[in-house]
Amino acid sequence: QSALTQPASVSGSPGQSITISCTGTSSDVGGYNYVSWYQQHPGKAPKVMIYEVSNRPSGVSNRFSGSKSGNTASLTISGLQAEDEADYYCTSYTTNNTWLFGGGSKLTVL
Amino acid sequence: QVQLVQSGSELMKPGASVKVSCKASGYTFSRYGMNWVRQAPGQGLEWMGWINTNTGNPTYAQGFRGRFVISLDTSVSTAYLQISSLRAEDTAMYYCARETSGLIDYWGQGTLVTVSS
């Protein structure tokens, strides 16, 4: 199974909004609402930012939001801050009863 | 509080085996599945498999069948990842991560396995 497709890099200036896409198939992203997004800073373990497409765990800023349309899920970060600079990964449950990660997107805050 | 504490870094020779542990605390171990995720140097996250901590039944991703074994010792709330016939390309950070109903929430700190002659 190939990884979900994410842009390799995205960038934005402080205060702006950015969106990271995550494209899969009807066997994963399109077939389930079990899509999550993880933030990973260098040398650290991933941290969940969004789960079940659009839910935020407690403690995660409401500047982070998620959505899905068809086989593509999206993570939007509004009011970009320097601390948001990190790698972001999407993941989806699949029809094989497995999880599949995206290739990751490096967010640069200009 | 929920904690997943993994064993320390390992430097292994090609062909050897390694067993990485992940000790859970702060919750009822059998109520949550445990996943293992690999991250090669400078690369992305790769889901390896998970184990049902109730039944002990593991499920593996396609590329992780054969040399990789996920197991449990419920008496000490610990999950294990064993890798045999190690190769240079197995050099990576290995994470354990707790799962509940469609959400992988808590992650261990990671264990770096380096395979080098």
Image (spheres, coloured by chain):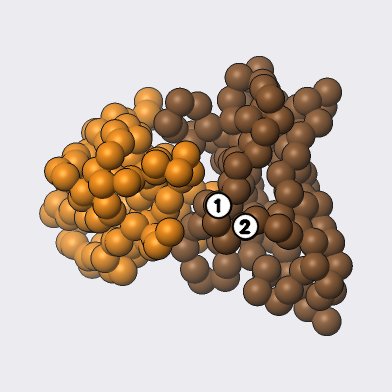
Chain colours: A orange, B brown
Q: Element under label 2?
A: helix
In front of the other: B77 or A48: B77
| Position in image of residue A69 (x %, y %) | 15, 43
Q: Residue furthest bottom?
A: B117
Q: Amino acid at mark 2?
A: Phe
The numbered mark 2 sits on a residue in which chain? Answer: B
Q: Is residue A15 above or below residue B116?
A: above
Mark 1 burial class by Cα count in 10 Å: few <14, some 14-19, many 20+: some
- Whether residue B12 appears in this view of the structure is no
* Residue assigned mark 2: B64
Q: Amino acid at mark 1?
A: Ala
The reply to whether label 1 and label 2 mark residues of one chain is: yes
* A3 relative position to B61: left or right: left
Q: Element under label 1?
A: loop
| Position in image of residue B66 (x %, y %) | 71, 58
Q: Quadrant of residue A107?
A: bottom left
Taking the spot 68% from the left edge, 68% from the top edge, the residue there is B90
Residue B106 tag number? none
Q: Is residue A65 above or below residue A102?
A: above
* Residue assigned mark 1: B61
Mark 2 burial class by Cα count in 10 Å: few <14, some 14-19, many 20+: some
Taking the spot 19% from the left edge, 41% from the top edge, the residue there is A68
How many numbered markers are drawn?
A: 2
Taking the spot 28% from the left edge, 39% from the top edge, the residue there is A31
> Is label 1 in contact with label 2 (beta carbons under 8 Å)?
yes
- Whether residue B54 appears in this view of the structure is yes
